[in-house]
Image (cartoon, coloured by chain):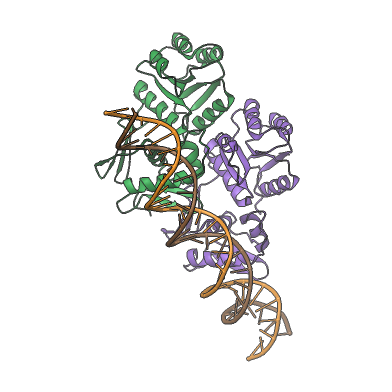
Chain colours: A green, B purple, C orange, D brown
Amino acid sequence: MIVLDRAEARLLVVDDEPNIRELLSASLRRSGFEVITAADGREAVHFAERTRPDLVVLDVMLPDMDGFSVAGRLRDVSGQTPVLFLTARDATDDKVAGLRVADDYVTKPFSLEEVVARIRAVLRRTRGDLDIPARLQVGTLELDEEAHQVWVSGEPVRLSPTEFKLLHYFMVNTGRVLSKAQILDHVWNYDFGGDAGVVESYVSYLRRKVDVNEPRLIHTLRGVGYVLRPPRDD
Amino acid sequence: MIVLDRAEARLLVVDDEPNIRELLSASLRRSGFEVITAADGREAVHFAERTRPDLVVLDVMLPDMDGFSVAGRLRDVSGQTPVLFLTARDATDDKVAGLRVADDYVTKPFSLEEVVARIRAVLRRTRGDLDIPARLQVGTLELDEEAHQVWVSGEPVRLSPTEFKLLHYFMVNTGRVLSKAQILDHVWNYDFGGDAGVVESYVSYLRRKVDVNEPRLIHTLRGVGYVLRPPRDD
DNA sequence: GCCCAGGCTGAACATTTGCTGAGAAAACGA
DNA sequence: TCGTTTTCTCAGCAAATGTTCAGCCTGGGC
């Protein structure tokens, strides 16, 4: 991970469950963001007024007021601040209601990978933030986040959602060793209860689809984890 | 041992087992950290408030409160203090989900080598602490912690996890004589029951893989131990 | 040069780890 | 609704790793 001398952006995370709040803020800090948290709507508006965040991550279900009202208030006090909504998986209707072009949403239970990716995407759209590349490339491997597409030596490859997220996580962390536990923690939903065996399966799928040419890019480090390594330094 | 004029960082170690607490604090002090210990959650929060540690090493299973609540409280009182969790190897329960808030974690039984390495890694990441190098070099030998890779004269070398930890221990202690007992204590898990014969085996493996060029770097001191000595002052 | 404790190393063995194919179950799309 | 895709589990296999040990080697004291 690149160490930034200043934060990528300032985020306000709003959720009434302390677990989720902690999970998100810890993870987002690790991803290089500056994070402020709030437990309910009132607090959220208050902090937003004072700190002017670049983006708000907002649970739709809050104890004191509904997320969309909060979003409205936020915009009153904080201008065009984009919002990433957190919603329950089955709340299909009300979602669309409050969404503007600048916004996006993620359903609970989410994976950290997903949240970070969405935040970056929104920031890219709203600020034209080009420190955040939309296209990743490692060796003959290319991945376009926005188009949700992957090419191997220029040929498009079909990946399932999980395969895509896993590959994305690998590419964002090129050259860094990732333990199976770490991969599980970031790529799978936070409520996933299974063991790290899935990761092996998906690495196997990925290799078959994506790592077919020599030199191989995805390396196994026994007892440690996996690395995606660019060619040239086996 | 090199005497440091100031501590590398201030740590708070929290574990209810006195053995583990002692083991850790002694070892961490020897590694140049300033260490405060606490036996339970209440104490931990109390000390954290007063001493503002740079990092907290925290057992997930505490008598009075669970480690995650402690971590939450610590963050409340002490800002963004990073946390390294200690957990049982088979913690496949809801614990695992909570571990995601950790900046890193180590499973029991651990090796001291591992704990120290993780602490340094976390401090490097969270503070951008560059006194702590991510890459070690001795003679033609290079070791990158983050990429978990070793080169000899620029050529990558494959090491097993134990070989890697042993070499790392040698490189961190370049020029210092290490007895077999000392090596056993730091590189092997604290519950390892075998005798120091293993160390001889692994030194042998390491020499074959890593110490192939003249002048030799790993020296045997009969009846005393081993030293990794940089060339030029044999 | 001889001796011996300590050190070295190859081989054997047990254990752990990772890979993969097959299949059950759930989610998805038409 | 039904077929298709996707996710996840599991078991068998193969290979790497960890550990022990016995026989050989070696440095250094005499």
Task: Answer above or below: position of B135 versus A114.
Answer: below
Q: Residue B106 at what x, y percent from top left?
A: 59, 45
> Which residue is located at x 71 percent, y 33 percent?
B41
Q: Residue B42 at what x, y percent from top left?
A: 73, 31
**Residue A38 in which image quadrant:** top right
Looking at the rendered structure, the number of numbered marks drawn on it comes to 0
Task: Answer above or below: position of B75 versus B90.
Answer: above
Whether residue A4 sits left or right of residue B54 in the image: it is: left
Q: Residue A130 at what x, y percent from top left?
A: 34, 29
Task: Answer above or below: position of B97 versus D19.
Answer: above
Is residue B189 shown to the viewer in this render?
yes
**Quadrant of the snapshot with the C terminus of chain A:** bottom left
Q: Residue B40 at what x, y percent from top left?
A: 73, 36
> Which residue is located at x 39 percent, y 19 percent?
A103
Q: Nearer the viewer, residue A78 or A62?
A: A62
Q: Nearer the viewer, residue A139 or D28?
A: A139
